[in-house]
Amino acid sequence: MFACVEGEQDTPPIKPQPTETTTTPTGVTTTPTTTPTTTPTDFDCSALPEGPFDMVPFDVQTEEDFDFDGDGFVVYQQGSTLVGQDQYGNERIYAASVSGDPAGLQVMYSTDIVVAAQDSGTLERVNVQTGNTTTIISGLVQANGIEIGSGDRLYFTEFTPNGSVRWFDATSGTGEIIYDATSPNGLALSPDEQVLYVAGIGSGGSSSILAFDRISDDEWEDVPRVIYDGNDEFDGVEVDMCGNVYTIEFSSGHLYRITPDGSDATLLAVVDDPQAGWTAWNSMRWGNDAGGWKSTSMYLTNRTNLWEVDLGVPGRQHPTMGP
């Protein structure tokens, strides 16, 4: 238990500025965005697009992690401030001071945002209506990756040599350690939430993707399955609506699709940022169909810019996409 308290564009795509505006609860003037749509259920999972896939840069200066809200804004950290930016160039502030060293963040079904604050060893919950921040878990060591399950159950990691993979129920205030692991990082649930995939674990370094099978609501298998071993470190991991697993190599930018049982891994793209002096492909996230962020596109960050790779398959249901 734990304490709770391959084509490139010369310029990024920016849409024409609409004339109608609205005001957010924080008083920031923004542009109306499209309503999120439900992920299609009639997609043919036996006919996944093979590429080649184009890579599109966006003029969004992300840090280690990001997500999308239901209003069409990409959410990310800017220093200690939690901010958002839409594809029209409009910005909003969710909270002025959350963490000086954030490692992960995700939007919840409630529309609140959870931030993994490494500097304070906490998970912080940001109320997007008021801007207030509440500590929901404390006593952590290098809080890192976050995943949101149904009912706003949180899954997260502690990225240390003696780290752990954990779950926490924000409603009941209960939680458990799923697994004691060496430097676990990003994580993602399968579409039916019966498998939890964890990136960044390996005997000789961070180089594996593990799969934990669910036993019951609160229990998971003690011994995970290794579905992929690589030659580089892994940080981000995501799952599409067909159950395939995606990860990107930390240094090389190699984006892979892996079958759920790990029997096959396909190199989909090599994401390259010629403007960056170094690469650190930390995080990846499917869009949610709000404001132009497509649910068939994988969005990636190297702590410098945001990139899009349209893979032609919808991602796992995002909390902001509706029923």
Image (spheres, grey):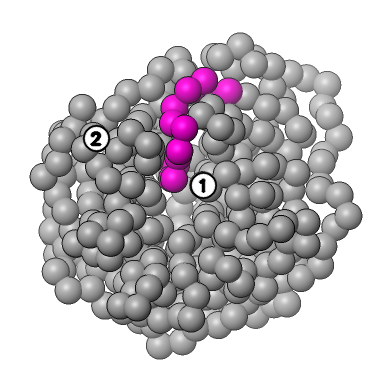
Viewer-side residue, 204 vs 248: 204
Gap between marks 1 and 2, in whole Å? 19 Å
Secondary structure of the residue carrying numbered label 2: strand
Q: Which residue lies at the image location 23% right of the left edge and 73% below the top edge? A: 224
In this view, the residue farthest toward the bottom is: 263
Q: Quadrant of the N terminus?
A: top left
Q: Label 1: which residue? A: 65
Total tally of numbered discs in the picture: 2
Viewer-side residue, 272 vs 44: 272
Tell me which amino acid carries mark 2.
Answer: Ile
Marks 1 and 2, the one that precedes in the sequence: 1
In this rendering, the answer to whether 117 lies above or below 260 is above
Describe residue 131's horizontal placement relative to residue 307 as left or right.
left
Circle 2 crowding by C-alpha within 10 Å: few under 14, some 14–19, many from 20:
many
Rendered image quadrant of residue 261? bottom left
x then y, percent, for residue 59: 75, 44
Question: Which circle marks residue 137 in the picture?
Answer: 2
Q: Which residues are magenta?
A: 93-107
Q: Is residue 28 located in the magenta-colored stretch of the structure?
A: no
Q: Which residue lies at the image location 14% right of the left edge and 49% below the top edge? A: 176
x then y, percent, for residue 153: 27, 43
